[in-house]
Amino acid sequence: MIIKDIEISEIKIPLVVPFKTALRTVDAVDDILVRVTSDTGEVGYGEAPPTAVITGDIKPSIAGAIMNILRPTLIGRDVDDLIGNAAAMDLALHGNNSAKAAVDIALWDLYAKSCGKPLCRVLGGKAREVETDVTISVNPIEEMVADSLRGVSDGFNILKIKVGREGLKDVERIREIRRAVGPDIKLRVDANQGWEAKQSVRIIAAMEDEGLDIDLVEQPVKAHDLEGMRYVTSNTYTPILADESVFSAADAIEIIRTRAADLINIKLMKTGGITGALRICAVAEACGVECMTGCMLESKLSVSAAAHLAAARPIITRSDLDGPALCKLDPYEGGPTFDGARIIMNETPGIGITGVPFTPIKL
Ligand code: MG
């Protein structure tokens, strides 16, 4: 099966409430979609969000990378040559990981469809259920408490709380949320690089001393500050999760080797898709380091690809795949069922999304 064409489209979906982190505020999913067509007429779909503050990707750069570089690189190549195709993309273009991810996801979708199996089975797992947390944006405390209670009443047992803008006041945020939701809800804290190393230890120690029972703290310090993150990891009891610090398997090796973090967050938009994510899984599996799979502001298409990965690899013990839950509507047909915290996989071949609103755009 040969790659015959690669096209792009756009998808815009308003969010239920604005998404706010220490790095940015966003009102809508506004992503690029990719459609790869084979010489047999089969199609695979992928998606890439512009996450300028984390990956450096913006919509025109994603569109340009796909249409000007990745498309001519891949047309005529064998769909089954997934590793070779990913290597060809890396050889042709440095960085631009979200653009590569969209194409790589579409190729895996197409390949799994040609096997007649859901992607999770092709990746070595089966269609099990995946539980996701839901993100609570950083806001005034009363608003975060209300959002947390809404998340719990919507059926989420795990909340991922965005902090990192106000130092020690973040302890107050977590204290009030813990008080409101009770002891049985898991709380994850994501500082999105918003703290300094010593400040992180002070904040995390305060949360530990108060018995706030935090499942993990994500990316407390700047992405490049591995020494600082190692300081935080070795001076606190709470598990530390590396997110913005890990794009590649080489990054994961460095973090594991230096014990800079306890856990690794795999996002397809950082790894350049499924192929790069599998490399990190392999490293983590070899070293026994548990992973989380997360997403950017993505719709159900690429988030479902990440859910297939989570269903396939037991080293992924946590999932932060709430993109579809944050969207006001689901523009697709088919795919895994996103029911509150539950992502229920099914046996439809590929990613499983059968209807994709797709109007090809030219550059
Ligand atoms: Mg994060």
Image: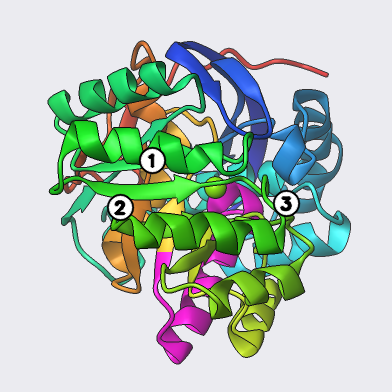
Q: Which mark is residue 277?
A: none
Is residue 166 or residue 225 the one in the foreground? 166
Q: Which mark is residue 74?
A: 3
Q: Label 1 vs label 2: CA separation?
A: 7 Å
CA–CA distance in space, label 1 to label 3: 48 Å
Mark 1 and 2 residues: CB-CB less than 8 Å, in contact? yes
Residue 313 inside the magenta-drawn segment: no
Residue that badge 2 annotates = 212
How much space separates mark 2 and mark 3, taking CA atoms? 50 Å
**Within 10 angstroms of label 1, few (less than 14), some, or many (20 or more) residues?**
many
In terms of secondary structure, what is the magenta stretch mainly?
helix
Residue wearing tag 1:
174
Q: Do the residues under discs 2 and 3 have CB atoms within 8 angstroms?
A: no
At label 1, the amino acid type is Ile
Q: Is mark 2 within 8 Å of ligand 1?
A: no
| Secondary structure of residue under mark 3 | helix
**Could you say which is closer to the camera, residue 257 or residue 312?**
257
Q: Is residue 275 shown in magenta?
A: yes
Single out the mark in the foreground, 1 or 3. 1
User: Considering only vertical position in the picture, is 20 above or below 305?
Assistant: above
Q: Position of residue 242 (x, y in %)?
A: 57, 63
Where on the picture, by quarter, is residue 331?
A: top left
Q: Earlier in the sequence, mark 1 or mark 3?
A: 3
Q: Which residues are magenta?
A: 267-291
Identify the residue at image location x=57%, y=46%: 191
